[in-house]
């Protein structure tokens, strides 16, 4: 295959480092929005997640966060705060993955939020940090620990 075709076959996070955005959606009243991943999800099926998506070539990072939240949760972002980044190393089946995540806190309209991608999510519910659902996506505890002070303000 020509080199250009090979590039299109490579998987982000597996064959090369992937870049993603991860977002913690809240309503400014102590509630966070979490989605339960369906059996059709790429990985971590049946686990509760805060949300995220891959950064595509030539996309602006903040535009990607807003686009992903609109697609997944059918709501607009009212305020967006960059929290930091993480190197995420995981094993996904037989594959080892490496993602650099750009982490955000996003204020969204609680009344507008609903499942925008029913093929990926089984449920969408508001929780508090003291009453999280189980099982959680493997990366959620690390995210919450790293940003706990910023998430409470």
Image (cartoon, helix red, strand yellow):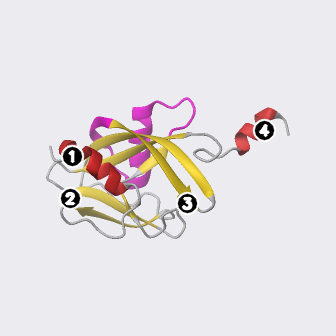
Q: Is residue 76 magenta?
A: yes
Residue located at (33% from left, 40% from top):
104
Q: Dot 1: what SS?
A: helix
**Earlier along the polypeptide chain: callout 1 or callout 4?**
4
Asked whether the residues under the numbered discs 1 and 4 touch, taking CB atoms below 8 Å apart as contact, a structural biologist would say: no
Q: Which residue, given by chain and number where applicable, does mark 4 sit on?
A: 5
First along the sequence among labels 4 and 3: 4
Look at mark 2 in the image and give the residue it sits on.
129
Q: Earlier in the sequence, mark 4 or mark 2?
A: 4
Give the magenta part as a residue range: 55-83
Total numbered circles: 4
Instruction: Check disc 2 and report its element: helix, strand or loop.
Output: loop
Task: Say left or right for 14 vs 106.
Answer: right
Q: Position of residue 96 (x, y in %)?
A: 59, 52
Q: Which residue is mark 1?
A: 151
Q: Sequence order check: which comes first, mark 3 or mark 2? A: 3
Alpha-carbon distance for marks 4 and 2?
45 Å
Give how far apart the Cα atoms at labels 3 and 2 are: 26 Å
Q: Are marks 2 and 1 in contact (CB under 8 Å)?
A: yes
Q: Secondary structure at mark 4?
A: helix
Looking at the image, which is closer to me, 66 or 42?
A: 42
- The answer to which of marks 1 and 3 sits earlier in the sequence is 3
In the displayed structure image, the side of residue 78 where residue 90 appears, left or right: right
Q: Which marked residue is nearer to the observer: mark 4 or mark 2?
A: 2
Q: Residue at x 69, y 44 (%)?
A: 10
For label 3, the residue is: 42
In the picture, measured across the screen, residue 129 lies left or right of residue 93, that is left
Q: Can you say whether 152 is above or below 79 in the image?
A: below
Mark 2 or 1 closer to N-term? 2
- Front-most of residues 149 and 49: 149
Real-space Cα separation, disc 1 to disc 4, in angstroms: 42 Å
């Amino acid at each position: 295959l020509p080199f250009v075709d090979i590039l299109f076959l490579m998987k982000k996070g597996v064959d090369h480092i992937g870049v993603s955005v991860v977002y913690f959606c809240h309503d400014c009243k102590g509630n966070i929005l979490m989605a339960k991943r369906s059996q059709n999800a790429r990985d971590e099926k049946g686990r509760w997640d805060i949300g995220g998506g891959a950064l595509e070539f030539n996309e602006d990072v903040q535009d990607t966060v807003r686009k992903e939240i609109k697609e997944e949760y059918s709501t607009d972002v009212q305020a967006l705060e960059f929290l930091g980044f993480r190197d995420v190393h995981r094993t996904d089946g037989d594959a080892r993955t490496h993602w650099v995540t750009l982490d955000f806190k996003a204020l969204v309209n609680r009344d507008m939020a609903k499942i925008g991608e029913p093929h990926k999510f089984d449920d969408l519910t508001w929780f508090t940090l003291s009453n999280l659902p189980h099982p959680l996506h493997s990366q959620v505890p690390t995210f919450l620990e790293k940003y706990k002070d910023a998430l409470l303000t």
